[in-house]
Image (cartoon, rainbow, N blue to C red):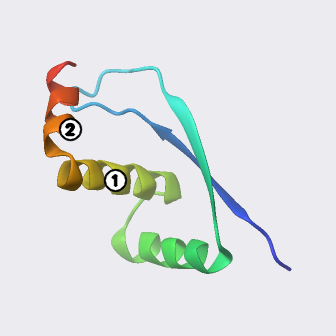
Amino acid sequence: MAFSLMFTVVYLERMSMKAEKTKVVATRVTNRTAELIDEFCRRDGHVNVADFIRDAIREKLQREAPELYRRFFEEA
């Protein structure tokens, strides 16, 4: 049975850990990618796929746009 897996990601955590408004961001991935992500989450200890995706987004922003990432948190 083929299916598309849709990840719903609630993102906008700030370092201050204050309760903030969030926005849902959704995407589709292949079954193979979903299986890879599930396996990685089990091995790496992520609570769930959404937790993994939030971490991945944060890490990509820190790596590829550090000045934007810093400015975002400084404005908090």
Q: Nearer the viewer, mark 2 or mark 1?
A: 2
Question: Measured from the top left, where is residue 66 in percent x and y?
Answer: 15, 45
Disc 1 is placed on an element classified as helix
Residue position for label 1: 55
The residue that appears at 36% across and 51% down in the rendered structure is 57
User: Considering only order in the chain, which callout, 1 or 2, is on the residue closer to the N terminus?
Assistant: 1
Query: Callout 2, which amino acid?
Result: Tyr
Q: Is residue 43 left or right of residue 14?
A: right
Labelled pair 2, 1 in contact (Cβ < 8 Å)? no
Q: Position of residue 53 (x, y in %)?
A: 44, 55
- Quadrant of the rendered image containing residue 15: top left
Q: Which mark is residue 73?
A: none
Q: Which residue is mark 2?
A: 69
20 left or right, relative to 22: left
- Is label 2 in a helix, a strand or a loop? helix
Q: Is residue 5 left or right of residue 59?
A: right
Count residues near mark 1 (Cα–Cα under 10 Å), then give few for <14, some for 14-19, many for 20+: some
**Residue placed at 40% from the left, 62% from the top?**
46
Residue 71: percent from left, percent from top: 16, 28
Residue 65: image location, x then y, percent: 21, 46
Q: Is residue 19 above or below residue 24?
A: above
The amino acid type, in three-letter code, at marker 1 is Asp
Q: Is residue 5 left or right of residue 43?
A: right
The residue at the point 14 percent across, 34 percent down is: 70
Q: Quadrant of the C terminus?
A: top left
How far apart in space, not on screen, are marks 2 and 1 (Cα)?
13 Å
